[in-house]
Amino acid sequence: MFNAPRPAQRYASAPVNGLGGSFVDENPLAASIYDDPWSAAPSPSPQLVPGVTTALSSVIAESNVPDSYNRAFAIVDVTHSGEISVNALSRILSTSRLPATTVDKIVNLVSSRPRVSKLEFFVALALLALAQSGKDISIEQVAALAAEDNLPEPFLSIDTLQPSTSTYSPYSTYRQATLDPWSAPSFASNGGGGSDLAAPRSATTINGGGATSSLAGSGLPREWWNKQEHLDVTIQGQQGFILNRYTVYEITTERGAPVHRRYSEFVFLWDCLVRRYPFRLLPALPPKRVQPDASFIEQRRKGLARFLNAVTNHPVIKEDGVLATFLSEPSFENWRKHTAVSLEEESASKRIDRIEEITVPSDLEEKLAFVRGKINALIEQWQRICVLTERIIKRRESAAVWIPSSIRRTYLPAHFKFPFSSSSHPPLDDDHVPGPASSTTSLVSGSLSILSTRTSHSDDFESDDQADLARLTNVLRAVVEVNGRCWRGDECELCDGVRQGIGHVASHTQQQSDLLEQRTNTLLYSTLEALKSQRDLYIAMRDLFVRRDRLSVDNVDRLKKRVDSNSMKLEGIKAAQKDGWHEETDRVVGLIEKDQATISSLMNRRVFIRASMWHELRVVLHNRENVLLSKLVQDLARDEHAFADGVLANWISLGNAVEEMPFE
């Protein structure tokens, strides 16, 4: 039902205040292959995979999973994404000390994809427990035990698990010092009443106070890019009843204990901020979807994290009282019930001093028009960059290569059918154990697969044509086990030497798999999110232009005409001096004074809007779109350099290790 096409919608949630998350109908984010939550396209149907994988959704769906299953998954799911790599699954299964052939069989039974879901991981642990107890390894056996609510618990030596080089904390590249980049006071608690939190707090003006400024010419603290505050958003699970279930998100900051929020509370925060700061760069929220799938929820989590990191690093919005409470109050819902929140616009409580007003250039409208003229093109190009990066991640996640059929026919003997390059080869199991010749064939095929290059989209190939380094490691270890003894029966230096060499290859392909996984995680959780933040920045600027067009309109001209009319009327009353003319004079004078006060307030608001737009253009947009992009490119270059060095060192180490492999 939730895969049905959805009508076109704005990429933000439905407005609750008449302002809306975005004021345009164009959707620049509809092309994401990762099902970006702003997309109006339906959730993509999961790809069918051969074998039993398609039936795993109902294997243990109604069974109570032992706590050890969840603990084991939490150890390897370091990114809290709900999925792990085949490499991580293989590593944790290897702690059972079962034969590598059995581990490889379990891995191939539960998944033929490069990623393993939580459900597939649980099935793998159940299969592992069956193997440890000497029972048949089959999905049917697991389903029968699950129906009896009696899933077996495996014995794992997780404490002996060797640390993987792929251990990665999302956004670690961007986690910096906890210094407040704008020297703002710490978040206030709610203990002293709700009045301070209910009213918006204004940032100190750059030119005010007379104190020595620590701000650079950009209007931001020196090296502010190294002092960015960072917040993590993780999914805590579902709560509520069947018809009223909602996702709970945990927000982790560097200022206090984590807090839990639901999506509706994010919407309330956004609504407050957009009412208070309509002329500031404010990113939109990812929308809500009826019956969302896991992929959509994960993308929405990332969108919420980007939103929070943007507002908490905005030089003005970051000081807002409601934002402070949102990030610190244990029960935000109770706080809302007992606190009257002011939605007064920022311009009503803040005045622009004369110095700030003078600094606004006279050609501001020309500068804004120039930026506005290129903003849609920038959004389009950055969205393309994000989509291309996602495709690269998809290919790297596969950690797989493909031998084109033309090369296979030209360079490989026709009677060879390799399990890594031919979809017609049967899977390896206990009844079909390859001998030395077929083992060598598998190794050669896997090596050729590693050396080849796949340049087309991963969806263009059958899953049986994929070769995963983690699976290759398991197969190589199985080869070592199968060839544990030579047919000669006595000690054979040739067999022992070759077997040790293949063992070295297995350990180094494991290391290569770790490096690839680390590289993919860095690109997925750091680089891609930084690219999307850049895209979101331009979308926020486009929305700012639209908000200004709609909300900056005032009736000053009409009020001035009314003042002139009332002034002429007042002169006529004074000249005629009819009965009761004093009372009528006082009434008209009151109307004139009221209109003049309104005109003065609106003129001040005009000045404030100009100063705000200049601040957002000069300080926020100009700095963030350039400085953070420089940092992103530098971090990307360092990450790729480190990866290349690691790969080179790994294969040099393998070359040294196999140098003494015997030939006779």
Image (cartoon, helix red, strand yellow):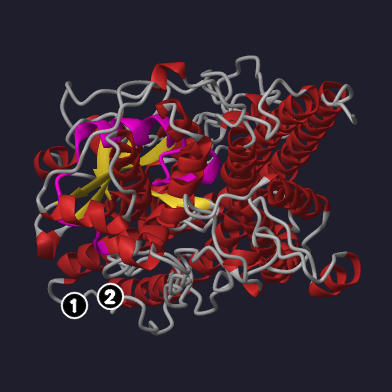
> Who is closer to the viewer here, 343 or 189?
189
> Who is closer to the viewer here, 357 or 494?
494
Separation of disc 1 and disc 2 at Cα?
Answer: 7 Å
Q: Position of residue 25 (x, y in %)?
A: 50, 79
N-terminal of the pair, mark 1 or mark 2, is 2
- Count the marks: how many? 2
Q: Residue at x 85, y 67 (%)?
A: 413
The quadrant of the picture occupied by the C terminus is top right
The quadrant of the picture occupied by the N terminus is bottom left
Q: Residue at x 21, y 55 (%)?
A: 246
Position above or below: 295 against 122: below
Q: Position of residue 16 (x, y in %)?
A: 27, 65
Q: Position of residue 662 (x, y in %)?
A: 87, 26
Position above or below: 506 against 51: above
Residue type (three-letter) at the residue carrying disc 2: Ile
Q: Which structural element holds mark 1? A: loop
Pointer 1 and pointer 2: residues touching (CB < 8 Å)?
Answer: yes
Q: Which structural element holds mark 2? A: helix
Residue 62 on the magenta span = yes
| Residue under numbered circle 2 | 573
Span highlighted in magenta in the image: 58-87
Q: Residue at x 39, y 77 (%)?
A: 565
Q: Is residue 235 left or right of residue 167?
A: left
| Residue under numbered circle 1 | 578
Residue 71 on the magenta span = yes
Q: Residue at x 36, y 55 (%)?
A: 275
Residue 71: name its quadrant.
top left
Residue type (three-letter) at the residue carrying disc 1: Lys
Q: Position of residue 576 (x, y in %)?
A: 27, 78
